[in-house]
Amino acid sequence: MKEQKLRPQLVADHNSLERIFHRPENEQSRNVLTKYMEQILFGLHDFLQKHVGITEEIPLKVLAAQFTSSKIARTPVKKLADIITEIIEEIAPQAVNVSSPYFIGHMTSAIPFFMVHLSTIVTALNQNPVKIETSKVVSVYERQVLAKVHRLLFDLDETFYNIHIQKPESTLGSFVEDGTLANLTALWVARNRLLPSKSGCAGAERDGIAAALKDRGLHRLTILVSELGHYSIRKAAGVLGIGYDAVTPIPVDSANRMDLKVLERTLKEHHRDPETSVMAVIGIAGTTETGAVDPLPSIASLCREFGVHFHVDAAWGGPVRLSERYRGLLKGIEVADSVTIDGHKQFYLPMSNGMVFFRDPKAMDAVAYHAAYINRPGSVDLGIRSLVGSRSATSLVLGSALDIMGAGGYALLIDHGIETARLFAEEIIRRPMFELITAPELNILTYRLVPGELRGSEDPKEPANEEVRLRLLNKINIKVQRMQREAGNSFVSRTTLRRSGRPDTVVLRAVLMNQRTNHKILNAILDEQEAIYRNRIAPTLRLNKAMGLTP
């Protein structure tokens, strides 16, 4: 308490504002900032390993109790040095070290150390690519980056890119915040191109969806997507006014890919219905739960046959096109009408970076907006055809990363992820206590722990017992995942696979995208899961069985 009284009171006046706005407040602040920034800039992963755990066994309620103040103090309460120290010593240890090679649970992973440098420069420049007046050369540079990724996806000829790369009237794509907004943009364009304003007929964008449908004698639009489709598709349907019930899930086959027979049958049914129109069919290049890739060439063929917009959600799998060895897994993406990619996934960029691309450079004219003070007709402002307004110049980060690593560098990361996932699957199959549920097509797989006493074929003659067994397996895997997460040594996520006509199955889900994750680490993760079951879960199950509570 005495130290607090002797401490000079911080004030908010012009002199102090000048100090904190333009430079470090004092030598102490400079030293603290330099100390930690040097570690971050030149030893990022060592810094994270030292200061950030996988996750610690501290309940969220306890953490929440530490952050209950809702008042903004009238005068400053902390100096920069204090803030930096607090973040490093108090916040960071309770954050999640997504860069750890033992973190194999989500689509967020380690970033190359130079991403911090690039992001710092982007922040310092503070360019806003929504208009040329706040970005200038950055807007020109962004068009080049978009063209590079567009070419990676659609692979059109040199003449096409020479014409459109810097042509103000052409839009090859758009940067947005994430895959959700990218999918929304693609479906926004699809809706407006299906229901345009024209002489004597209302348009969805100008007159609203109800008027546009009524003028055409339609009652509803629908979007067809695999039942493994990302929930952002339903969000988009809600925002676009067609309602999320308009999203029709198509069942998947045994390889977790969209069932083409059901898709074709559904398209024919809607084609015969004069009151329904299919707004888009969505193929997935890397489903969130299992990493499966839909049969894109066949879906594209059906879309051409029925005249439907073909969108590919490649938020996860898009960068696989950089791999000479595995790019064939995404065959068919080049004939899509639109494609979504998340840069903060397998382009290994910091949050947040989403992109949407269109094969037709005129497609985004369907969502063009103008204003007197910005995005004027005839200008080269990128915000004219974009869902988002003000945003960061993340193109500088992606473009620089492509130059630093090259396609070959990214290919090494992608190849490592796919091949490590296959090795992990083989190890899971070798171990009697585990069962591989979905084999990896890209670098995601699912599996579950199945103790010997709960193994056995599904017996249709005893459905009650089988239901009890499945329910118990689900509980076991939930507990294993939760206990491993709380122990803080490693992290594997879990999900519940829900398929048409099949029981819900809780599975452990692994995402392999960290180039430091190897076979030894994966074995350690499985060893830990086995130990958790044997030492902490099995004794309880034996007690329950003795009491007649389990089969």
Image: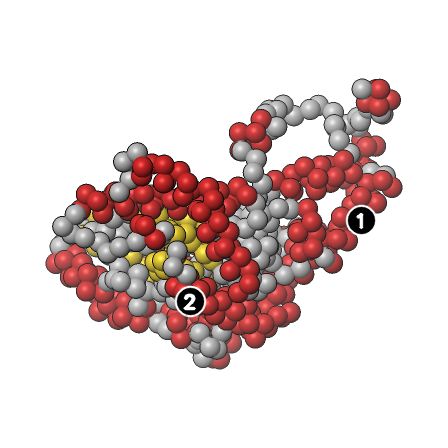
157 versus 533 height, above or below: below
Percent coordinates x, y for residue 113 in the rendering: 67, 59
Percent coordinates x, y for residue 261 in the rendering: 19, 64
- Location of the N terminus by quadrant is top right
Quarter residue 515 falls in:
bottom right
> Which circle's residue, 1 or 2, is located before the other in the chain?
1
Quarter residue 57 falls in:
top right
Most extreme residue toward the bottom is 158
Percent coordinates x, y for residue 532 in the rendering: 47, 46
Give the residue displayed 24% in from the left and 56% down from the top.
457
Does residue 111 appear to the left or right of 211 in the view shown?
Answer: right
Which label sits in the foreground, 1 or 2?
Answer: 2
Quarter residue 405 falls in:
bottom right
Does residue 507 appear to the left or right of 177 in the view shown?
Answer: left
Give the residue displayed 46% in from the left and 68% down from the top.
423
Residue 194 numbered mark, or none: none
Q: Which element is circle 2 on?
A: helix
Give the residue displayed 27% in from the left and 46% down from the top.
469
Pick whichever, 445 or 529, lies toward us: 529
Percent coordinates x, y for residue 212 in the rendering: 25, 48
Does residue 6 appear to the left or right of 41 in the view shown?
Answer: right
Q: Is residue 28 visible?
A: yes
Q: Measure the alpha-carbon separation of dots 1 and 2.
A: 46 Å
The structure's colour scheme is secondary structure
- Name the residue that disc number 2 marks: 426
Q: Which element is circle 1 on?
A: helix
Q: Is residue 133 visible?
A: no
- What residue type is disc 1 on? Thr
- Location of the C terminus by quadrant is top left
- Name the residue that disc number 1 marks: 34
Pick whichever, 122 or 489, lies toward us: 489
Dots 1, 2 in contact, CB < 8 A:
no
